[in-house]
Image: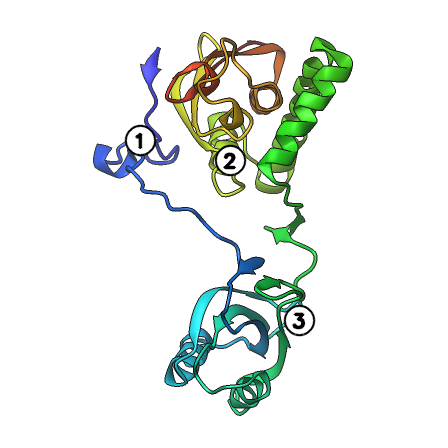
Amino acid sequence: MEKLWVKRKEDSDTAESDILRLRRWYFPMSLPLINISDDRSVAEVSIVSKDVPGVMALVSSILASKNINIMSGLITSAGQPGKSVLTLFIDYTGTGQTIESIRNTLLSLKVIEDVNINTPIYEGLLIEQFGFPLLLAGRRYVLMALECFNMMIKRMQSILGTSGLVLFYEMGKYAGEKRARHLKEVFDLHGWQLVMVALSEVQPTGWGIAELTVINEEEREWRVTVKDLFECTPFRDSSKECRSHFFRGYLEGVFKEAYELEKSSCIEEKCIASGSEACEFVITGVKS
């Protein structure tokens, strides 16, 4: 088996420095959905504007001139051509500003069409109230606390025993097959290109940091390493067994569809639950 180099299929002569996956650095991404700020004057501001360059910079400049701090925010489509929505969590403590004065200041800008402001539902607790549904690349997503997912696994295992873990594996496999079919239909992806896209999605959706480290298409054998896999993180260094079931099934489903395998399997050889630095999976299959 050989080390995987991510090559552009259409250009086999690309310089090695251009086709290697570059080392990345990561940071915790905090979505502007819930903010806890004791003894602070905070608010959520939802701004509908014309979809033109410089709106974010203009709004930031105006708020800064009032000594208002932007704690977090995002900009997205308003669902209407030519419009965008800027959602901000702001801290206006000690500025002498009020909710109404902030709204009027923003509405005075020609590019701003509407401004809605949401205040804490309870003292110190600000919860986003304007955005729904939650979309990623046009697909609806739901957020679930890792602790909740962990409790679901434990509860299912306590009721069904090992059959519950098998069920989680089959659920993951079905989800992986379905995602791979979607990537085929929408982007016409196949083989390792489809796999690379599927693995790249793992990080922004919070599942972990995945890398296809070994590829041997002739022998139909692949190896995937995942750091901080959501399914195993709650059990870090506390188990003698590998703990991935859902994601292990998901990987098998993705590879099965990507390479049109008649038979496939996915084994977790190393796991952070049993003391390894990362979870390592070996996927094998037989071509149909």
Depth check, front residue: 238 or 88: 238
* Few, some or many residues within 10 Å of mark 1 (<14, 14–19, 20+): few
Residue most toward the front? 39
Q: Is residue 7 left or right of residue 201?
A: left
N-terminal label among 3 and 1: 1
* Few, some or many residues within 10 Å of mark 3 (<14, 14–19, 20+): few
Q: Is residue 250 visible?
A: yes
**Residue beneath the point at 38% across and 85% down:** 65
Mark 2 and 3 residues: CB-CB less than 8 Å, in contact?
no
In the rendered view, tell whether residue 47 sits above or below residue 77. Answer: below
User: In the rendered structure, which amino acid carries the disc numbered 3?
Assistant: Gln
Q: Label 2 belongs to which residue? A: 202
**Which is more foreground, mark 2 or mark 3?**
2
In the rendered view, tell whether residue 74 sits above or below residue 181. Answer: below
Q: Label 3 belongs to which residue? A: 80
**Residue beneath the point at 52% across and 54% down:** 31
Q: Label 1 belongs to which residue? A: 12
Depth check, front residue: 239 or 185: 239
**Which is more foreground, mark 2 or mark 1?**
2
**Which is more foreground, mark 3 or mark 1?**
3
